[in-house]
Amino acid sequence: MASTFAVLADPSRREILDLLRERERPVGDLVDRLTLAQPTVSKHLKVLREAGLVEVRTDAQKRWYRVSPGPLAEIDAWLAPYRRMWEKSLDALERRLDEIEGD
Amino acid sequence: MASTFAVLADPSRREILDLLRERERPVGDLVDRLTLAQPTVSKHLKVLREAGLVEVRTDAQKRWYRVSPGPLAEIDAWLAPYRRMWEKSLDALERRLDEIEGD
DNA sequence: CGGACATATGCCCTTCGAGCTATATTGCCG
DNA sequence: CGGCAATATAGCTCGAAGGGCATATGTCCG
């Protein structure tokens, strides 16, 4: 998991993931939607691939990329012990709102 | 949320958060547990503070730091749309296991 | 008020990574 | 087989960021 956070730290890579979340896409499709040169996109895809966050399917010259969510589950697991902390805060917030509404 | 991932990308900072998750701690306590010089720890704490991930309480010369989980909730929200993807995978895995057990 | 303790800031060095352009690779089609 | 289309790799530059040491700031205590 160590490096998954580092991989997700880059906004372009998160944007790529968000695009791939909608549907499987070839590289050129991503290039059209991002304001990045094609080699830059390919480099990001390589990073995402090596982190296990995307998978590729070859179709003639095209490479179709799709999300491979495994590492995201590990992030989720890392978050787990913190989750109760903000849920507690939200609970407190809700109680305050209830009090106000109760007036 | 933009930069929260970048802040979490550093392993030292995640370690600090994990230590603070157990309990509120003064800086020196963190320095003892990390193999980092005190100024380095202070610098990380500044980054965490500016990202809203920790809060400080002053007590004489000591500064007690604690986790402030708000930004983590935003990470959790970003993950949300992906969650169903790996849950689907897990479901499929469970079904396979059920099949095997059914034999 | 002087000195010790606890933490923060400034400065420097070095490494890393994101972006680009140019070029290599791979596969299809005429 | 030649050439185009789609993607990947190489090489480069530049700025950001982490680490350390030295020092400043702030707080208590005698």
Image: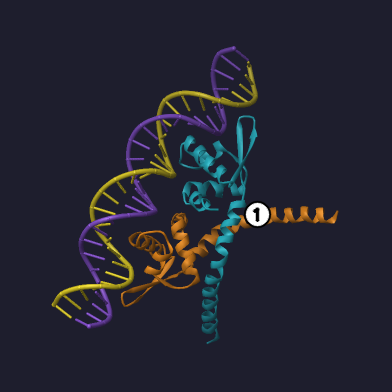
Chain colours: A orange, B cyan, C purple, D yellow
Within-10-Å neighbours for mark 1: few <14, some 14–19, many 20+: some
Residue A62, quarter of picture: bottom left
Front residue of this view, candidates B65 and B9? B9
Front residue of this view, candidates D22 and B80? B80
Q: Which residue is mark 1?
A: A86
For numbered disc 1, what is the local secondary structure?
Answer: helix
* Residue farthest right in this picture: A103
Q: Residue at x 61, y 33 (%)?
A: B62
Horizontal arrangement in the rendering, residue D28 relative to residue D6 (left or right): right
- Vertical relation: C15 (above or below) B89: above
Tell me where residue B12 appears, x and y as whole percent: 48, 46
Residue A33, quarter of picture: bottom left
Q: Residue at x 31, y 78 (%)?
A: A60
Tell me where residue A101 appears, x and y as whole percent: 82, 56
- Vertical relation: A99 (above or below) A61: above
Tag count: 1
Tell me where residue B21 appears, x and y as whole percent: 60, 49
Tell me where residue A38 appears, x and y as whole percent: 34, 62
Horizontal arrangement in the rendering, residue A60 relative to residue A23 (left or right): left
Front residue of this view, candidates B52 and A77? B52
Q: Residue at x 56, y 39 (%)?
A: B29
Q: Amino acid at mark 1?
A: Trp
Residue C23, quarter of picture: bottom left
The chain letter for the residue carrying disc 1 is A
Q: Residue at x 44, y 73 (%)?
A: A24
